[in-house]
Amino acid sequence: MPDTLSEEAYLSLSAEPHIKAVLDEVRQARIVVHGIGDAFTMARRRGADAETLERLRQTGAVAEASGTILTATDASCSPCAPSACASKTWPRPIG
């Protein structure tokens, strides 16, 4: 489901039989194929304002994975300044 759905829309769509069936299959998965996106592209998709984008730039954000912002300077890819990315619409868990 898209991150930007309202809670009401998320609950409504989750109740649709076809979508519910797909979500049930996802919940039973034993593996996950996961992507990492550009921090700024993903922040813009999630409606980040100019102040948040500037904080991301200042912290050295380069990538995003499931709402976690990553820097290029940390070899362990630790999240950088999660508070700079506090968006109410960022990923919600399935199930």
Image (cartoon, rainbow, N blue to C red):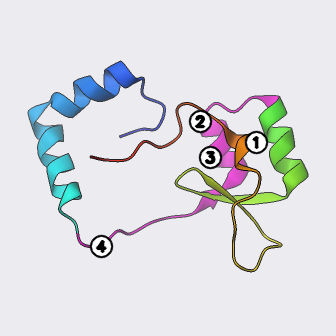
**Three-letter code for the amino acid on which mark 3 is drawn:** Met
Where residue 52 appears, as percent x and y from the top left, is: 78, 36
Where residue 47 appears, as percent x and y from the top left, is: 64, 30
| Front disc: 4 or 2 | 4
**Precedes in sequence: disc 3 or disc 1:** 3
On the image, numbered disc 1 is attached to which residue? 84
Disc 2 to disc 3, C-alpha distance? 6 Å
- Assign the N terminus to one quadrant of the image: top left
Q: Is residue 48 magenta?
A: yes
Where residue 44 appears, as percent x and y from the top left, is: 67, 38
**Three-letter code for the amino acid on which mark 4 is drawn:** Ile
**Precedes in sequence: disc 1 or disc 2:** 2
Q: Secondary structure at mark 4?
A: loop
Most extreme residue toward the bottom is 75
Disc 3 to disc 1, C-alpha distance? 14 Å
Q: Which residues are magenta?
A: 30-50
On the image, numbered disc 4 is attached to which residue? 31
On the image, numbered disc 2 is attached to which residue? 46
Name the residue: 42% across, 38% down: 2
